[in-house]
Image: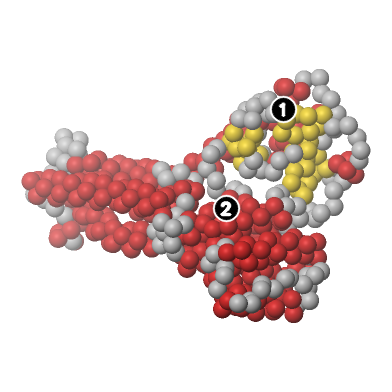
Amino acid sequence: MEKIISRLKFAYNYIVNSIGFYPTLIAVFFFILALLMLYLESQGLSTRFKDNLPFMIITDGPTARLILSSITTGIISLTVFSFTMVMLVLNQASANFTPRVIPGLISYKSNQRVLGLYLGVLIYTLVVMVNVRSDYYNINLPGFAIFLDMCFTILCLGFFVYFIHSISQSIQIESILESIYNVTHDSLKTEISNDNGSDVPNIFTSNREWFPLESPETGYIQSLDQETVLELCKKHDVVLYFEQPLGSFLIKGVPFARLNKKLDKEDEFSKEIFSYVSFYREERPDVNYLFGFKHIAESAVKALSPGINDPGTAIKAIDYLTALFALRMQLSDEVILYDQEGAGRIRFEHNTFGALYAITLSPIRLYGKGSTVIVLRLLYLLKSLLFKVQDFPQFKPILYKEAKLLLFDADENIKNPGDREKINMQVFELNKMNILSAELPLLDTAD
């Protein structure tokens, strides 16, 4: 039963984030509404409205069929055009930014609701159309249902204008970066609120013998049902140490975790754990904040490529990364999960701050090492983090090391004396703060 519940949780998360979730819900709602309206029509709804509001009720059969046919044709055209625009937007985003932003664009709820409205009105129209002049009714036409369909069509036209505006805004890189930043920020805040600190129980640090646990599957391990896995570890009285953080790629037959004791049925235990683990290819920042850092960094690298050549976008990406790194400082590198009795059962690591800094900013530094504006913005990122690092002194060596790498690349690639002087001015400001353990080297500006 627990396996079924766990699978249902993962299936629910997958369905909710798919492009067809809201359209399906809205379409079902309109189908039920159509059946309800036809039932009310059979009870004389149009007859009552005809006496008080005759202009709302259509009484001519050919006119009713013409209206419903026109609505059907028009809604189909709107739907096809809208879906075509979505596909074009996704294709352009993949070509100009990074393919990893596509799941985020698909998950825009506003666009899904508009498409769902189109499908729902189309279904409503078809249901009403096939019941015009039906022998089931004691009235000539479901007049009020047809009038309501006309109102829905006008609503669709209004939402079509909104859809054009929304889709044109969502393709802009500023909107994409802000969306990724907001999702990553919320994911990080959640991790921080659930963080138990950097203290690791002795059972994980003692010099005991650990036994490797091989992966029974190949793929990206994205998330796990924590409560169920904790109960499983408690049931077998074992402690589980994941050697790689969530989001890592596992290979079948290669150890992915360690146990504090040997189990007789180790393969069965491993397979049971994986029945509570979610595997999928999408890199969603709402599931793992690491993917948000990667998406923003990849957008910056794409902008710095010769084919795009958009340093302004790279600067915006660096600004968002600055805010996220400042927030990441508050999160410890270790994750310990405790059972209901307070015993530490599962341990896995986040990507350390240093590893995350290198993975994210090294590509930007590599592609932007010849651009003065990018180097200056990366130095500004460092300066901003130095204001935050006072409360987290363990990160000072990391910032110093990365700053030296940046200045080394700048010294090798930027030869203009004026640009080198600008960089030195920024380095002088950093050294003036007296926060790093040693002063950063200045670039040689001699002719």
Left or right of 433 on screen, residue 189: left
Q: Are marks 1 and 2 in contact (CB under 8 Å)?
A: no
Percent x, y for residue 12?
53, 40
Which one is closest to the eye, mark 1 or mark 2?
2
Residue appearing at x 64%, y 30% in the figure: 251
Amino acid under disc 2: Lys
Q: Residue under label 1, please give it.
A: 214
Residue at the outermost front position:
447
Classify mark 2: residues with Cα within 10 Å, few (<14), some (14-19) or many (20+).
Answer: some
Q: Which mark is residue 294?
A: 2
Query: Mark 2: which secondary structure?
Result: helix
**Residue 202 screen position, x and y as percent:** 90, 44
Residue at the farthest top position: 264
Please state the total of marks drawn on the protein image. Answer: 2
**Of helix, strand and loop, which one carries label 1?**
strand
The vertical placement of 324 against 270, above or below, is below
Task: Name the image quarter holding the C terminus.
Answer: bottom right
Q: Residue at x 26, y 50 (%)?
A: 81
Q: Is residue 11 visible?
A: yes
Specify the amino acid type for callout 1: Glu
Q: Quadrant of residue 206?
A: top right
Q: Is residue 374 visible?
A: no
Identify the residue shown where x is 62% and y is 49%.
Answer: 288
In the image, taking residue 163 as reference, residue 130 lies left or right, namely: left
- Label 1 and label 2: CA atoms lie apart by 28 Å
Q: Looking at the picture, how far across and down is residue 112, in whole percent?
A: 39, 51
Q: Quadrant of residue 31?
A: top left
